[in-house]
Amino acid sequence: MSDLITTQSIGAVVEIVLNRPDKRNALTWPMLLALEAGLDSAEKTPGVRAVVVRGEGRGFSAGIDLQAFANLADIFGENWRGNMLSVTGAFQRIVTRLERSPLPTIALVHGYALGLGLELALACDFRLAAAGARLSLPEARLGLIPDVGGTTRLTRLVGPARAKEMILTGKMIEAEQAAQWGLVNVVVPMDELRAKGEALIADLIQCAPLAVTFGKRVIDGLADIDSGLQLEAWAQSQLIQTEDFTTGVQAAMMKTTPEWKGK
């Protein structure tokens, strides 16, 4: 497993840690594969009752590493932009593993959770946030949409109007506002975040494991997540080939204002 993703067992809990603090825990494909391996290991370990996902350093995750776009050709082939349905499907599959896990999953969010980082948190069953944490799905500012479950899961949590406010503007919201919207379960001071997670896990452990697993399946089954993921993949397969996408990524890397052409 990559040392950019570390795991540790603490009693009945497995922690999966995004461990790239010098890059604000920006995510790459190898990191997602390592995260999946950590989740697989947790699910196969007797006695584990919950999985915690958190980030080292100043924040949870700044999202996908923009430099990683240059490496996608090595992973998915030179024509990866023309095969975006498969690429998006691969990313979605790993992130959705958090949602489909028989174990309850808890994201401890501090500092920032942006783009793919927030999509990871959205796929968890619970999101506990430190005061002052900032959350955003800024993909529209790159000429894209959140396509790894972000559009679908955010809408399920906060409703269409607020989801549009975040996704169509790419705006940042504070954790306190996110709690009011139902995007995070609770906001606590940073020095109380780990303890709050431990208290939640203690409550979960009081309940029968199979009851927790089946309760999670029934609740998640009420929403048509699969159709939403398919729509996300279709939209991204169109957007990834636009001139605006290239312009947006270049502007983000150069920290300039993009000049959109709508094509």
Image: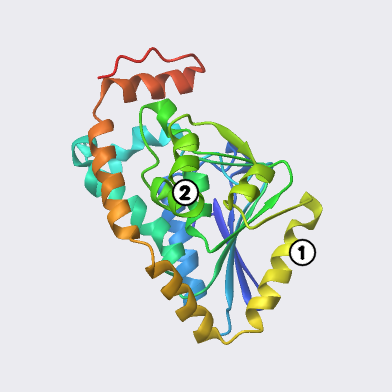
Tell me the kind of residue under disc 2. Gly
Residue 59 lies, in percent from the top left, at 65, 43
224 to the left or right of 191: left
Tell me the kind of residue under disc 1. Ala
Residue 157 lies, in percent from the top left, at 50, 54
Report whether residue 45 is seen: no
**Which disc number belongs to residue 195?**
1
Q: Residue at 69% across / 41% down in the picture?
A: 58
Residue 201 lies, in percent from the top left, at 66, 73
Report whether residue 151 is seen: yes
Q: Residue at 58% across / 34% down in the picture?
A: 172
203 to the left or right of 195: left
Q: Residue at 53% across / 53% down in the picture?
A: 121
Badge 1 element? helix
Q: Residue at 40% across / 20% down in the picture?
A: 250
Badge 2 element? loop
* Residue at the disc numbered 2: 159
Quarter of the C terminus within the rendering:
top left
